Image (cartoon, helix red, strand yellow):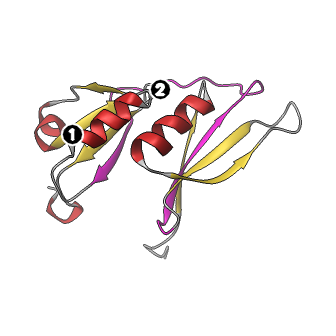
Amino acid sequence: MIDPAVAVRLARPSRDLAAAERFYVYGLGFDVLYRAAAESPDEHDLIMLGWPRASWHLELVGGPHLKVSPSPTTEDLLVLYLSAPVDDSLVARLENAGGRRIAQNAYWDRWGATVEDPDGYRLVLSSRTWSNVT
């Protein structure tokens, strides 16, 4: 059986790693956990973002050797359960860092705020806690 505390990596392509880094680091408050530059044409640049003590992180890949472009759908969501009302200043920081607040759907609009990152992937800041999600 897999331990429920297993580490998780979410990986996505990015058109512009610098823009994505601004959004997640300066807007959201993630740390840069790791960075690597491609050393050959069969590699890509990457950046790992998150919080040092979290059991998950976001890996973004990009650069001139990337063979796939971001193709987010309206349901490609990264949801953060804040367990508190969404702070308007946090949404403003995300917008100032290259994000765009959007309406997601009635459920997520009721329980939080949705902001598109520079690649079009959606970040949902939910006022709910994970334990009360049904």
Specify the label residue 19 is tagged with.
Answer: none
Q: Which quarter of the figure is the C terminus placed in?
A: bottom left
Residue linked to disc 2: 118
Name the residue rendered at 17%, 56% in the picture: 84
Q: Secondary structure at mark 1?
A: helix
Image point (25%, 56%), residue name: 82
Which residues are drawn in magenta?
53-81
Residue 83, located in which quarter of the rendered image? bottom left
Q: Residue at x 65, y 37 (%)?
A: 61
Label tally: 2
Q: Which amino acid type corresponds to the residue marked 2 in the rendered image?
A: Pro
Picture coordinates of residue 62, whole percent (x, y): 67, 31
Q: Residues within 10 Å of mark 2 (few under 14, many from 20)?
A: many
Q: Is residue 37 left or right of residue 101?
A: right
> Which is more toward the observer, 81 or 9?
81
Query: Magenta includes 85?
Result: no
Of the image marks 1 and 2, the number of the one nearer the N terminus: 1
